[in-house]
Image (cartoon, helix red, strand yellow):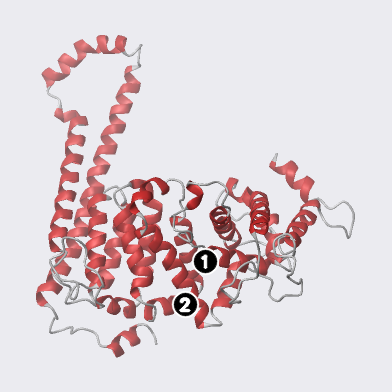
């Protein structure tokens, strides 16, 4: 089916002619920026640049109405459907002619900037109700936000080969975004604050609705993945976020998401992206040193007043809570340990506020190890005495008949599989406990020693030197 579609859509009938796929895509690209269809009729086609929303590159928004928004949504859906074939392919480099045609088209850069500004301009509480589409089906704004975000991820995830046997690569539309935002500091500020606003809404929004809405609107991971991808591809944005941006803009919403999501393994993907993000930022000494900034609010149950509670305390408090509940998230825990190991070097005066939480996390980890050992012991052959084995032999016929003639060899195989799984669970939990205790031995030493004589707290010049400034 795939081969037939490729031949039908991309086969050139005569020399000099365009394939059907290219004709369709270029027609859609023209329609996406047509006054009277996706813009108001008063907009001129010579408007430069002709973007859907203001933000990066342009400050003002070109006028459009409800019908134009619905037309944008329909065209974006069509484009996403055409390029969704990458979802059915393996992770090896795959040449998508659909994505490649859009990337190389004359309006490809307009499309990716329009999608970016549409996502960043989205206001979840614009009419006073969070995620209005969950209540009413007529509002296309939120659906356009979601489709634009998905389309943006597909377009910027292009590591496309221009030829199967060539090392030359098609320029990625992600480079278009990074080139635009690196020209002006205001563009970096706009992106960071807009994403921080979206994450803050998801983390600290109307809690009475969030439990219901979270299952309908799952944009956490998509927003985080795109921002993480953008941060990796733009060193200036990475430097700006680590050294200049207010910590409350991005770090606190992510910490809040850890607290919200760590209780459920359904959020394992988002947790992994968040901890990867924090680990990347913690590689900068300037970022770690700024964690000593006093937080505006202290969480409920904190032994410290708000004036002494720092962002580092909040980070430690949250990730320990995540470790205590997210026992099965091995990658999450490993990244947490690595992040805290980076941070603790620059926070020798970490307060004792989260220590009670640390004890609770240790107890939870101990309970999981004991449970794992108990489970492994229940399936271990040595746990059964000879008399028990003899009794089991007599009852085997009854059990066999009850299960409809289950094969004895299959049953033994299942028991061996359970045993291996239980022993693996013990090993994993013990590894987590070892890493956990290793970090806290260092943390307690730094806490009680405050500043070690052989390694005083770093000065600003030391931080700048380590960052290569």
Q: Percent position (x, y) of residue 448?
A: 9, 73
Residue 168 visible in the displayed image: no
Residue 36 lies in what quarter of the image?
bottom right
207 with respect to 379 (left or right): right
Q: Which residue is situated farthest in the left direction here?
A: 448
Q: Residue at x 48, y 47 (%)?
A: 134
Q: Describe the element under mark 2 as helix, strand or loop.
A: helix
Q: Residue at x 15, y 25 (%)?
A: 384
Q: Nearer the viewer, residue 201 or 84?
A: 201
Q: Nearer the viewer, residue 285 or 419?
A: 285
Q: Describe the element under mark 1 as helix, strand or loop.
A: helix
Q: Percent position (x, y) of residue 25?
A: 74, 56
- Quarter holding the N terminus is top right
228 with respect to 115 (left or right): left
Q: Which mark is residue 120?
A: 1
- For label 2, the residue is 189
Q: Which mark is residue 17?
A: none
Q: Nearer the viewer, residue 459 or 89?
A: 459
Q: Earlier in the sequence, mark 1 or mark 2?
A: 1
Q: Is residue 432 above or below residue 249?
A: above
- Quarter holding the C terminus is bottom left
Q: Residue at x 40, y 58 (%)?
A: 202
């Amino acid at each position: 089916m795939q081969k037939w579609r490729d031949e039908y859509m991309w086969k050139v009938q005569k020399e000099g002619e365009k394939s059907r796929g290219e004709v369709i895509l270029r027609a859609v690209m023209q329609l996406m920026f047509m006054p009277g269809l996706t813009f108001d009729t008063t907009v001129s086609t010579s408007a430069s640049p002709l973007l859907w929303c203001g933000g990066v590159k342009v400050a003002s928004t070109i006028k459009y109405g409800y019908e134009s928004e619905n037309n944008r949504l329909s065209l974006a859906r069509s484009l996403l459907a055409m390029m969704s074939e990458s979802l059915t392919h393996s992770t090896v480099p795959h040449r998508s002619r659909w994505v490649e045609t859009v990337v190389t088209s004359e309006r490809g850069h307009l499309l990716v900037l329009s999608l970016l500004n549409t996502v960043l301009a989205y206001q979840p509480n614009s009419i006073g109700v969070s995620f209005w589409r969950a209540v009413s089906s007529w509002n296309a704004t939120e659906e356009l936000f979601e489709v634009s975000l998905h389309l943006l991820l597909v377009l910027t995830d292009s590591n496309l080969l221009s030829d199967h046997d060539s090392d030359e690569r098609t320029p990625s539309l992600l480079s278009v975004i990074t080139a635009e935002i690196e020209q002006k500091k205001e563009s970096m500020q706009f992106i960071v604050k807009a994403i921080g606003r979206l994450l803050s809404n998801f983390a600290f929004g109307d809690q009475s609705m969030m439990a219901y809405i979270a299952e309908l609107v799952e944009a956490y991971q998509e927003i985080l993945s795109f921002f993480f991808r953008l941060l990796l591809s733009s060193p200036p944005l990475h430097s700006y976020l680590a050294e200049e941006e207010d910590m409350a803009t991005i770090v606190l919403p992510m910490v809040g998401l850890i607290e919200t999501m760590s209780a459920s393994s359904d959020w394992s993907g988002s947790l992994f992206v968040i901890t990867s993000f924090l680990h990347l930022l913690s590689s900068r000494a300037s970022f770690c040193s700024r964690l000593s900034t006093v937080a505006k609010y202290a969480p409920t149950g904190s032994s410290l007043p708000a004036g002494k509670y720092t962002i580092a305390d909040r980070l430690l408090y949250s990730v320990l809570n995540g470790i205590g509940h997210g026992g099965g998230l091995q990658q999450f825990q490993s990244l947490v340990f690595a992040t805290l190991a980076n941070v603790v070097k620059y926070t020798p005066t970490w307060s004792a506020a989260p220590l009670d939480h640390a004890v609770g996390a240790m107890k939870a980890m101990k309970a999981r190890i004991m449970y794992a050992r108990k489970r492994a012991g229940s399936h271990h052959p040595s746990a059964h005495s000879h008399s028990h084995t003899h009794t089991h032999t007599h009852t085997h016929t009854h059990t066999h008949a009850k299960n409809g003639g289950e094969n004895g060899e299959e049953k033994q195989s299942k028991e061996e599989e359970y045993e291996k799984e239980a022993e693996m669970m013990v090993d994993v939990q013990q590894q987590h406990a070892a890493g956990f205790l290793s970090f806290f031995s260092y943390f307690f030493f730094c806490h009680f020693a405050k500043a070690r004589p052989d390694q005083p707290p770093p000065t600003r010049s030391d931080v700048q030197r380590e960052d290569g400034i």
